[in-house]
Image: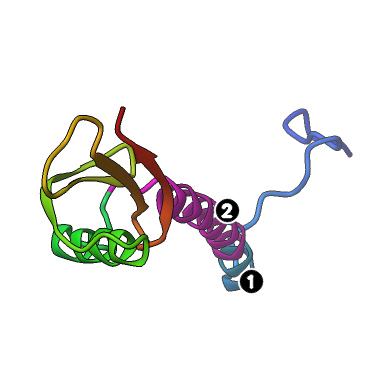
Amino acid sequence: MVDENDHPDTPESREPTVGDFRDLCRQLNLSALGYLCGVCLLLSGCSSDPHVGKKQAIAIARQEVISKGWKEFKVEGAVFEEGRWMVMIWELPAKPGGFVTLEISSSGKVIRLLPGY
């Protein structure tokens, strides 16, 4: 005899098991791990925090102008903007166009040297 409350198309209801909980945790952990890795990669590539400090950037710029043959010079300033250091150095005695601006990456590599004009 069939009871009117029986629904043959509905799966049986059961209590969740430890295995069900473990599977759910694995799914959540994999999703969270993937998300976390993506965020870390994004932040590491877009970081605006310099690895090289101001003093180091100036020292790198000084070495660069010395390698170009400059004997006397004055560091005018250094600023960190858009993920790189910009260091301005004047050759002495000062003359029109006698300066360079060195673009230095946050890892300490000279990207380019922009001569004055």
Residue 22 located left or right of residue 63: right
Q: Residue at x 30, y 33 (%)?
A: 116
Q: Quadrant of residue 18?
A: bottom right
Nearer to me, 18 or 116:
116
Q: Is residue 92 visible?
A: yes
Q: Position of residue 117 (x, y in %)?
A: 31, 27
Relative to 28, is 103 above or below?
above
Within-10-Å neighbours for mark 1: few <14, some 14–19, many 20+: few
Q: Which residue is mark 1?
A: 19
Q: Position of residue 54 (x, y in %)?
A: 16, 57
Nearer to me, 72 or 6:
72
Q: Amino acid at mark 1?
A: Gly
| Disc on the earlier residue, 2 or 1 | 1
Residue 53 located left or right of residue 20: left
Q: Which residue is mark 2?
A: 31
Proximity of marks 2 and 1: CB atoms separated by less than 8 Å: no
For mark 1, give the secondary structure: helix
Colouring chosen for the image of the structure: rainbow
Relative to 24, is 45 above or below?
above
Q: Quadrant location of the N terminus?
A: top right
Relative to 83, is 28 above or below?
below
Q: Residue at x 78, y 36 (%)?
A: 6
Q: Which residues are magenta?
A: 24-48
Q: Identify the residue at the far right of this view.
A: 1
For mark 2, give the secondary structure: helix
Residue 74 located left or right of residue 89: left
Nearer to me, 82 or 99:
99
